Image: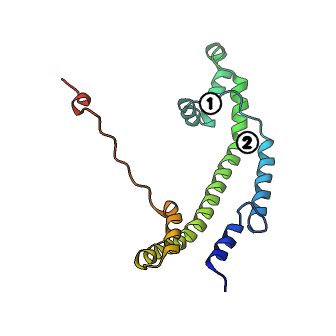
Amino acid sequence: MSTEKEKIDTVAALDATDPAGNPYLADALERIERLRTVLEGFPKSPGKRLTPGQLRSARRITVDALQQAERFAVEQPNIAGALADVGKMRDTAHFLLAYEGLREKSILHLRALDQFILQRKYDASRYALGLYRVIKTYAANEPDSDQMQGQVDIMQPLFGRPRRSKPALPADPDASAVKK
């Protein structure tokens, strides 16, 4: 029969970065490497990051809108000639038609992966939280439970909910009031 110290040491020995201790790590590292290889084939984003307003504008304009604007610029060069870069609009429309499906599929797969990971995490967290509650109750009700209280102290920051802090009151309440 093993002691509590041996059990804790065994759990600590199962380091998340050790492939022998983590049966999922080798598969995850291989998949990360494959994904990195695929992403390296895409060109890097030119220049600075877009602002939130620029992102909203880019998301609002559809491929159909770009194609309509391109058609108008080609049909009416005397009106739109100086305002529109037809080649850039055509290239962007072709790029979107080719890669928008890949982007959407990637987002779908990421959401499914996130759900899969969170489901496993949720199932295990229910057991862990129940165990914490049992240990906490046992430590509170048993007079000789110094070792259990030590475990509760270790687990408290991990399982306890953070306290909501109240907003700080101003030093002088009259100073913060708006005078009319």
Mark 2 and mark 1 in contact (Cβ < 8 Å)? no
- Of 78 and 108, the residue lying toward us: 108
Residue occupying image coordinates x 53% and y 30%:
53
x, y percent for residue 80: 63, 17
Q: How many marks?
A: 2
Left or right, 153 with respect to 5, comes to left
Question: From what the image shows, is residue 66 above or below residue 19?
Answer: above
The quarter of the image holding the C terminus is top left
Left or right, 168 with respect to 136, comes to left
Between circles 1 and 2, the one closer to the viewer is 2
Residue type at mark 2 is Ala
Residue type at mark 1 is Gln
User: Earlier along the polypeptide chain: callout 1 or callout 2?
Assistant: 1
Q: Which residue is mark 1?
A: 68
Residue occupying image coordinates x 57% and y 37%:
59
Q: What number is the disc on residue 122?
A: none
- Of 48 and 78, the residue lying toward us: 48
Question: From what the image shows, is residue 116 above or below residue 46?
Answer: below
- Distance between the alpha carbons at the discs numbered 1 and 2: 18 Å
Helix or strand or loop: what does disc 2 sit on?
Answer: helix
The image quadrant of residue 58 is: top right
Left or right, 119 with respect to 22, comes to left
x, y percent for residue 71: 66, 27
Helix or strand or loop: what does disc 1 sit on?
Answer: helix
x, y percent for residue 15: 71, 64
Q: Which residue is mark 2?
A: 98
Residue occupying image coordinates x 63% and y 31%:
49
